[in-house]
Amino acid sequence: MKFHITTFGCQMNVHDSEWLARALEARGWEPAGEDEAQVYILNTCSVRDKPEQKVYSELGRVAAHLRRDPAVFAAVGGCVAQQVGRGFFDRFPHVRLVFGSDGIAGAPGALERIAQGRDDRVALLDFVNIYEERERPNERTVAVPETRQAFVNIMQGCDNFCAYCIVPYTRGRQKSRHPDAVVEECRALAASGVREITLLGQNVNSFGLDKGGAGVSFADLLRRVAAIDGLDRLRFTTSHPKDIAPEVIAAFGELPNLCPSLHLPLQSGSDAVLKAMRRRYDRTRYLSIVDALKAARPDIALTTDLIVGFPGETEADFRDTLEMVERVGYESSFSFKYSDRPGVAAVNMEPKVAPEEAGERLARLQSLQNSITRKCLKKLEGVRTDAFIEGLSRMQDDGPTWWKGRDPAGRIVNVPLAEGDGLMGMMIPVSIVEAKKHSLVGEKAGSPW
């Protein structure tokens, strides 16, 4: 069977899709383009309205392929699948499988049964109480990522119930993966040649607070993974400020391969809005975390998420957000206008901020962020660092080949090198010679490791 996967949303969805593709390939299935596929899989996101609408549009496009091959069918997974569930069967007859985030472990087998005619339609929508280990197809195919980078899930779901967030309803309650399974997977990846691992979870700082973590804290897990031979870089995402432990903060100064970067979602700089959002920290607490992080690792690069126009947000509240952004000095941020999502508490909160006013605030925030980003990058000119090469850069000219790498903090570094191939996954010593708007330009400073 030939399959095609379309992914919407967060990095966890991207990782889920990559795992599903490997699992299907291990069964003999073949990835294909849109015009050749027999099975179309959509891994969906419902954090904002636009990705959800794209799912319906994509399913309409898939229906057109039925004219080419009546046996073509579709599967819908992820958060929208969890919300809409069997409703997809009524609206789109060619949808034969729906699976939520807890159901993805059974998706390869369900797809195989449907393709063989043993099942007509399958819904995998039940939440489970423990993290169910997925099959490890890479143990059979032993496919080392070309970039030598990998993502490893350490947990599923979330217990925070922030007022604007649909995640606890679509991904379920928090379930930590057994730490031994996490370490075993990371060790196998490093042994296969992976040099950089990112630990993934909806709120990694709360790892181990449920029984699935077997009493191991996130700080303990970080130390166990960081100690794996051959692992040059370790990252993690995403962190909730209310749960970050002093031991995790200290780890940035104690573990050489823990990268000096942290995505720490603020969401708002106003205490009143943070309380309405149910974030369970205030400005003072957040700034104390920032100060401790910078004390532990002075070169740490902080990034964040921000929501403008949350119900009840005043101009004064918004100015508090601008002040916090300047005070922290985020290197970059993801910022969005608030939008109602069905089923969350904020839907019923008033007063709503007019879309025009929210849009104007977003423009001001992004303008400030662009200015701070430029200043942060400018300070790096003349600094020597290491660029982990991810592939060819878009900055090509008639001279040497330009490669795109990332420094330890995750910043993009474009480097001209004589080699035209074979550098992906290599660590190249570079000197930063120029700061661009959102990236850096470097020149080779020595020989690859």
Image (tube, rainbow, N blue to C red):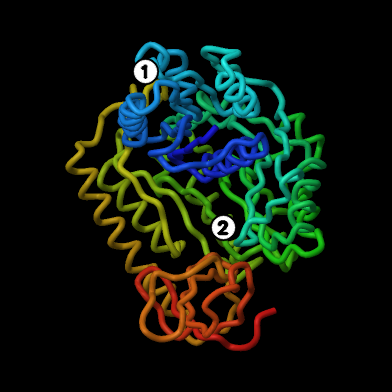
The residue located at (71%, 28%) in the rendering is 132
State the image coordinates of residue 231 (x, y, percent, origin top left): 74, 62
Is residue 346 in view? no
> At numbered mark 2, what does the secondary structure look like: helix, strand or loop?
strand
With respect to residue 275, does 266 lie above or below?
below
* Front-most of residues 146 and 101: 146
Counting from the top left corner in percent of width and height, residue 130 is at 71, 25
Give the numbered dot on residue 402. Answer: none
Amino acid type, residue under disc 2 in the picture: Leu
Label number found at residue 262: 2
Question: Residue, x 31% and y 28% (percent of image)?
Answer: 64
**Of pointers 1 and 2, the one earlier in the residue sequence:** 1
Q: Against 73, is 440 above or below?
A: below
Q: Nearer the viewer, residue 305 or 443?
A: 443
Q: Quadrant of the C terminus?
A: bottom right
Q: Is residue 396 above or below residue 8?
A: below
In the image, what residue occupies the spot 77% across and 29% down?
211
Which residue is tagged 1? 92
Q: In this rendering, is residue 67 above or below 15?
A: above
Q: Is residue 220 left or right of residue 419?
A: right
Circle 1: element type? loop
Q: Could you tell whether 190 is left or right of 41 in the image?
A: right
Position of residue 331 measured from the top left corner of the image (x, y, whole percent): 45, 64
Of marks 1 and 2, the one in the foreground:
1
